[in-house]
Amino acid sequence: MVAAIQMGNTLMKNRLMKLWQEYRSLVLFVVLMIIFRSVLADWNTVPTGSMKPTILEGDRIFVNKLAYGLKVPFTHISIFKFADPKRGDIVEMQDNRLRINGIEARYSNVEYTADAIFAIESYVGMTHRIELAPTGVSYFSSSGPVQVPPGHYLVLGDNRDNSADSRVRGFIPRGEIVGNASAVVLSVNYDRYYLPRMDRFFRDL
């Protein structure tokens, strides 16, 4: 009986060694890819329209995880910090017009459609397109002023009247910010049978 058990253990070890020899390259590749996505860069699928019109449902976004610092893999523990996300201390929203530290953002290229209002929002060198409800008024149109506590950030979706951002979820701790979304890698249109949006491939954000 003892000999049979020892023989069985030997056969099992031999099988495991053979499997390791056959698939070790694949295993190492998968492990390195997981570490790469945890520490250096990743991509995320956008499930909602909270960042329309800048980011659309179906976009796959490239995330640079070294934009702000280096972290221990699979944790929020910082090894070295390169920078912090830009922010304002006091933010306020009145009639969908953003104010940071008393300075109001500028709005241009306002476009009215049956489904939404679009505009270019500019503030201290930052410029991006935002989307508002067709009437320009909603529950989210006005809020604040609020003071952002140290080590936290207030985030706003570009789809201002349809975004569960900090006005709903509260301030975001610095440690929860894992990287910078810098580009659309690829995009598919959920409303058109997942056809690719070729014009959005490799588009900078």
Image (cartoon, rainbow, N blue to C red):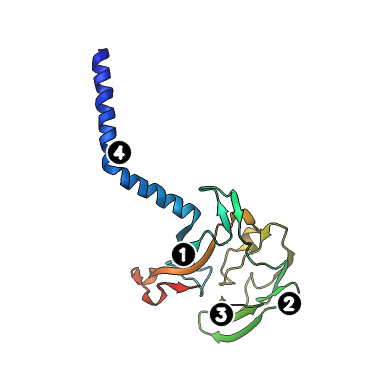
Q: Quadrant of residue 67?
A: bottom right
Q: Which mark is residue 103?
A: 2
- SS of the residue under disc 4: helix
Name the mark nearer the viewer: 2 or 4: 4
Q: As rendered, which of 74 and 191 lies closer to the eye?
A: 74
> Residue 140 placed where, x, y %?
64, 70
Q: Is residue 75 left or right of residue 151?
A: left
| Residue at the image point whose x is 45% and y is 61% from the top | 43
The Cα–Cα distance between marks 1 and 2, rounded to whole angstroms, is: 31 Å
- Of the image marks 1 and 2, the number of the one nearer the N terminus: 1
Assign a secondary structure to mark 2: strand
Q: Quadrant of residue 188?
A: bottom left
Which residue is disc 3 drawn over? 134
User: Real-space Cα distance between discs 4 and 1?
Assistant: 33 Å
Earlier sequence position, callout 3 versus callout 2: 2
- Residue 74 on image: x %, y %: 51, 47
Residue type, label 1: Phe
